[in-house]
Image (cartoon, coloured by chain):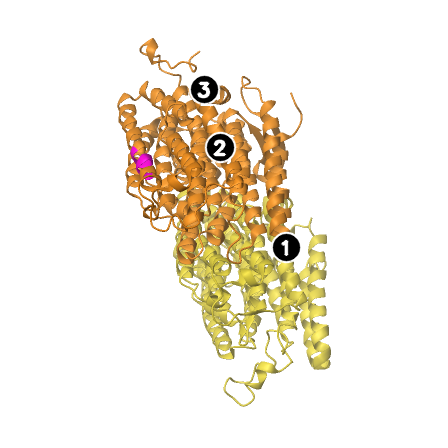
Chain colours: A yellow, B orange
């Protein structure tokens, strides 16, 4: 099926010479690729809309187009549920995990579109800036705060990013994976800089994310090159075959594996590659933070699982100790540093780090339960986080979101229902029974113990207790403290945001009380495993 | 054989009640109180009806129900009761209406949300009954953890007014302490599931199936440790008790009654229901350690109780001593001591519950938990003093009151196996007399403390109605404990017999207490 690369890889060891005389065009299975193609198409269409429609029309058309596209792609994913195989000359794999994670990404993306499209947060509308190219401090920068417009480019950017994420989890060769990584990352760097308030912070976040992201991409690319040097192929299946043979070039293999891991762990936000997480979470517009927190995490874990279960599956005894160490470090760093946070978005950022650590427990288990547990956890975590960040956009002061935790004091007395659902979401993140977060933790911990990772699970439960402390602290602030100083205003008319909070909260409850359907789906997806 | 799903009904009634009461508008406080009381009394009636159709002599669980819940993990909604669980459910349903009535004005002050307060108490009732009724370990765990949330809000939102900082601190301390234990237990629960998956080829949380497992001693020890830590924190046993005095002092009175009276029993119940039958080898191995902790707890709790100045903290410390007795009885692994320990759980719930209620009445009259703020109360409030004395004497196990048979059984049962421990523990009774009588002397006798006379009334009709059933039970169970013992004993005996601990033969006929050895 694959053309040039397979010719190069067929010799023993890395042979570079063998030249292909003719190039056969690979057959492309458009139908099976349709979800990704739909999203790409929507992104392109979005660019055209930007070019040809007036501002006012764009604000209406773009969300409908993008949201509709995500839903259409989701339907396509559902229709493809029985398909398994390698497509496009070995470049893309369609299998249980791919479909599960693509569907998850699309659902989260559609929810994020609701948040981005919200225009009733304050007098000027939503959270995105009207003109991102105006430098803070320049003339007109102040007027931006109250400008009614927004950069509707956000929608096609999101669509591109989603397409990249879907390709990321589906890629069967490291090269496609790298391309997907760039497609998903570049729009995110831009999106992070689009916040309407606190422009400086937002732009700092964008630059920081871009620099560190580019750095990690370089790691990934270098790792790719070394692996190619070792295996003579970038196809995951061939790398696995090559890794199972005893050879003289193991140094390349291990170095390459380590560098790939750095690139992927960066995207996940695992310690010690997590330092961008709180800054970007805080600086990015909150809907974008929600999109990133839920979507990128799924995509990055999807790719991590594929690389380590498929390409390096035979080497699990070599990489498991490293995953253990990273998981422990990530959990501890995330949970401990979160305790000291005073900003609710940074708090959620560090909690995202801690959760990355919990999910890594499932990855480190290196068994089927680990795969399905990880997938379930990602769904549970995504719904909870999107809803929690949606609540954050609603609690405002004159200066935008009341992200300072001190402002949240006494919110429970002011708005019991909203504060109650936020408390419920926090309890889910803390892993209290009858919430989605608990079932998620349960399934990855179960996988961990079944995979003989008992000490890892013990560390995980202890850090869960530490993490619970800071979630509970927010609840204490909201319910037990008297409001002090300037009270925040809770926006009431924002239907789209409230809908998102509602969906996220209900899903968090449903997945906690009746998780069976989704567990079945995840088990089913994991049981068939990755194709190669 | 009745087919009425008693336990499910018992779980649904307070759940629905709690939702309805909680959703009432704040202005309808009076309606919320009445509704909560109605639900609690209805629950009591239902539970009594269930108890009537319970067969003492039949082994195993009764009123069992079994439905799949999360098939992927072999989790089911399984409920059923044996004598031990039934006794504790009865204790819960007796105390809840008492608590509702005694807390009638508890949440009235400041701008507190009265309906939510009673909704929390009713939801707590659901979770308490759930933990005792669950026969699926996962279901038990869910109730066990979920229980923390209402208590957390009871302490944090409805603790003493004007002690904002302390009560948030206490609420968080309570939650984190218990969560740590719970999460460690979660690891053990999952471990148990994985072991079952390896042994049975399909994982399960069903208690009956888990009991049949043959677990290697090394794994047993690890799993035992995980469960034990959670229960030792919950009970609490020395040295995991430090949250208890804080929580006891900072809870609203009703919360404290349920917290110390029933919730803590979940810990001791867990020891006898889960730790011992599931991990018999580990039980034998850990028993000396647990017994040592128990005896230390008896003395530690008693000594610290003597030194307390805050009445609620004092009562909390006396409980620590009593939990020592309960753990001693449980881990002596004789059916006498075990029966005594379970009976002790019930009796402690009644006597400590009454103590907390009476202390609550005193605090509501004087706005102080400080012992030195009282003195000579018996002259102005003779009925209150009388009830206080009964509660105190029950707490120090005066013969004729409820705690005496249970303490006696614990000590006799322990003596047949661990003479030295039983003898040492007996000295704890003397300390109990000191902390109770010294407390009574300082608050109720002597010259009137300053400012007492102004507006201090004796028990109101409502308050008398609150204490009357508890006092009646304390006296009734002291004189005629046989129905309770008959209910508890078969379950305890079968628990210990299953793990191969039959009672040592009595050394002399005189050692056998009447009414127990038949």
Please check the rendered image and state whether residue B179 is part of the magenta-colored stretch, yes or no.
no
Residue at 63% across, 70% down: A116
- Tell me the quarter of the picture where residue B121 sits: top right
Question: Looking at the picture, does residue B240 appear above or below residue A135?
Answer: above
Q: Which of the numbered marks, if any, corresponds to residue B25?
A: 1
The residue labelled by disc 3 is B493
Q: Earlier in the sequence, mark 3 or mark 2?
A: 2
The subunit letter for the residue under badge 2 reads B
Q: Position of residue A345 (x, y in %)?
A: 50, 66
Left or right: B424 as drawn, with respect to A108: left
SS assignment at label 3: helix
Distance, label 3 to label 1, CA atoms, is 50 Å
Q: Nearer the viewer, residue A481 or A512?
A: A481
The residue labelled by disc 2 is B470
Which range of residues does the magenta coloring cover? B434-439
Q: Pointer 1 and pointer 2: residues touching (CB < 8 Å)?
A: no
The rendered magenta stretch, by its main secondary structure, is classed as helix
The subunit letter for the residue under badge 3 reads B
The subunit letter for the residue under badge 1 reads B
Kindly tell me whether residue A507 is visible in this rendering. yes
Report the mark closest to the observer, 1 or 2.
Answer: 2
Question: Looking at the picture, does residue A207 appear above or below residue A481?
Answer: below
Q: Are marks 3 and 1 on the same chain?
A: yes
Q: Are marks 1 and 2 on the same chain?
A: yes
């Amino acid at each position: 099926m694959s053309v040039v690369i397979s010719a190069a890889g067929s010799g023993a060891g890395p042979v570079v010479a063998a030249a292909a005389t003719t190039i056969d065009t690979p057959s492309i299975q458009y139908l099976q690729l349709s979800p990704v193609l739909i999203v790409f198409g929507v992104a392109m269409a979005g660019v055209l809309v930007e070019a040809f429609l007036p501002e006012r029309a764009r604000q209406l058309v773009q969300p409908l187009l993008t949201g509709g596209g995500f839903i259409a792609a989701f339907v396509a994913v559902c229709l493809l549920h029985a398909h398994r195989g390698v497509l496009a000359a070995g470049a893309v794999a369609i299998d249980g995990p791919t479909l599960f994670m693509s569907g998850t990404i699309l659902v989260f993306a559609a929810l994020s579109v609701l948040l981005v499209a919200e225009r009733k947060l304050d007098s000027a509308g939503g959270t995105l800036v009207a003109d991102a190219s105006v430098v803070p401090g320049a003339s007109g920068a102040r007027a931006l705060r109250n400008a009614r417009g927004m950069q509707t480019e956000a929608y096609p950017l999101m669509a591109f990013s989603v397409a990249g994420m879907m390709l990321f989890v589906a890629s069967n060769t490291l090269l496609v994976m790298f391309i997907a990584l760039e497609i998903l990352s570049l729009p995110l760097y831009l999106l992070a800089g689009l916040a309407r308030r606190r422009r400086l912070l937002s732009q700092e976040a964008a630059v920081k994310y871009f620099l560190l992201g580019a750095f990690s991409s370089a790691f990934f690319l270098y790792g790719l090159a070394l692996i190619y040097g070792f295996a003579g192929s970038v196809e995951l299946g061939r790398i696995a075959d090559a890794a199972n043979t005893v050879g003289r070039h193991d140094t390349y293999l291990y170095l390459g594996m380590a560098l790939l891991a750095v690139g992927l762990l960066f995207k996940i936000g695992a310690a010690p590659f997590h330092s961008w997480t709180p800054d970007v979470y805080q600086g990015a517009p909150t809907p974008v933070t929600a999109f990133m927190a839920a979507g990128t995490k799924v995509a990055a874990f999807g790719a991590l699982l594929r690389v380590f279960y498929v390409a390096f599956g035979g080497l699990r005894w070599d990489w498991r100790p490293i995953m253990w160490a990273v998981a422990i470090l990530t959990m501890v760093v995330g949970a401990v540093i979160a305790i000291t946070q005073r900003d609710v978005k940074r708090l959620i950022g560090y909690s995202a780090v801690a959760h990355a650590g919990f999910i890594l427990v499932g990855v480190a288990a290196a068994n089927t339960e680990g795969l399905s547990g990880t997938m379930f956890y990602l769904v549970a975590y995504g719904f909870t986080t999107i809803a929690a960040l949606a609540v954050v956009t609603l609690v405002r002061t004159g200066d935008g979101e009341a992200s300072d935790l001190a402002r949240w004091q006494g919110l429970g007395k002011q708005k019991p229902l909203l504060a109650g659902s936020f408390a419920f979401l926090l309890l889910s993140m803390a892993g209290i029974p009858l919430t989605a977060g608990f079932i998620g933790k349960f399934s990855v911990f179960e996988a961990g113990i079944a995979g003989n990772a008992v000490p890892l699970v013990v560390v995980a439960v202890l850090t869960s207790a530490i993490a619970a402390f800071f979630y509970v602290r927010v609840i204490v602030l909201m319910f037990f403290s008297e409001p002090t100083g300037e009270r925040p205003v809770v926006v009431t008319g924002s239907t789209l945001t409230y809908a998102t909070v509602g969906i996220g909260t209900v899903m968090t409850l449903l997945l906690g009380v009746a998780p069976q359907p989704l567990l079945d789906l995840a088990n089913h997806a994991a049981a068939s495993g990755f194709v190669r | 054989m009745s087919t009425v799903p008693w336990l499910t009904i018992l779980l649904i009634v307070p759940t629905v009640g709690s939702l309805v009461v909680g959703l009432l508008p704040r202005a309808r406080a009076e309606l919320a109180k009445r509704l909560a009381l109605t639900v609690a009394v209805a629950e009591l009636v239902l539970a009594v009806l269930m108890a009537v159709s319970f067969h003492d002599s039949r082994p195993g669980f009764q009123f069992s129900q079994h439905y799949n819940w999360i098939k992927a993990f072999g989790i089911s909604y399984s409920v059923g009761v044996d004598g031990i669980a039934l006794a504790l459910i009865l204790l819960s349903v007796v105390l809840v209406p008492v608590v509702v009535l005694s807390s009638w004005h508890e949440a009235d002050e400041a701008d507190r949300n009265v309906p939510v307060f009673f909704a929390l108490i009713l939801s707590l009732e659901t979770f308490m009954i759930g933990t005792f009724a669950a026969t699926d370990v996962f279901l038990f765990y869910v109730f066990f953890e979920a229980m923390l949330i209402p208590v957390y809000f009871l302490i944090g939102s409805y603790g003493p007014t004007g002690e904002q900082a302390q009560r948030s601190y206490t609420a968080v301390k309570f939650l984190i302490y218990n969560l740590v234990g719970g999460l460690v237990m979660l690891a053990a629960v999952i471990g148990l599931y994985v072991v079952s998956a390896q042994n049975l080829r399909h994982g399960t949380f069903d208690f009956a199936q888990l009991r049949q497992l043959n677990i290697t001693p090394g794994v047993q020890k690890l799993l035992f440790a995980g469960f034990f830590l959670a229960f030792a924190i919950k009970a609490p046993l020395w040295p995991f008790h430090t949250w208890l005095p804080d929580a006891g002092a900072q809870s609203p009175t009703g919360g404290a009654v349920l917290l110390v009276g029933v919730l803590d029993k979940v810990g001791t119940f867990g020891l006898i229901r889960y730790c011992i039958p599931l991990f018999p080898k580990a039980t034998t191995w850990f028993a000396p350690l647990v017994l040592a902790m128990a005896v230390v707890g008896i003395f530690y709790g008693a000594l610290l109780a003597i030194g307390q100045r805050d009445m609620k903290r004092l009562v909390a410390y006396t409980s620590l001593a009593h939990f020592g007795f309960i753990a001693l009885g449980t881990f002596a692994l004789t059916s006498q001591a075990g029966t005594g320990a379970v009976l002790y759980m019930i009796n402690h719930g009644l006597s400590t519950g009454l103590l907390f209620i009476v202390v609550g009445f005193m605090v509501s009259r004087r706005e102080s938990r400080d012992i030195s703020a009282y003195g000579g109360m018996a002259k102005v409030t003779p009925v209150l003093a009388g009830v206080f004395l009964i509660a105190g004497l029950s707490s120090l196990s005066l013969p004729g009151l409820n705690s005496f048979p249970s303490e006696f059984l614990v000590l006799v049962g322990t003596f047949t196996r661990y003479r030295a421990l039983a003898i040492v523990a007996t000295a704890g009774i003397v300390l109990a007399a000191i902390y109770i009588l010294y407390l009574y002397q300082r608050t109720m006798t002597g010259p009137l403390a300053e400012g007492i006379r102004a507006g201090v009334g004796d028990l109101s009709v409502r308050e008398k109605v609150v204490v009357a059933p508890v006092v009646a039970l304390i006296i009734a169970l002291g004189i005629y404990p046989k129905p309770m013992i008959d209910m508890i004993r078969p379950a305890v005996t079968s628990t210990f017999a299953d793990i191969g601990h039959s009672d040592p033969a009595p050394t002399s006929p005189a050692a056998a207490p009447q009414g127990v050895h038949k």
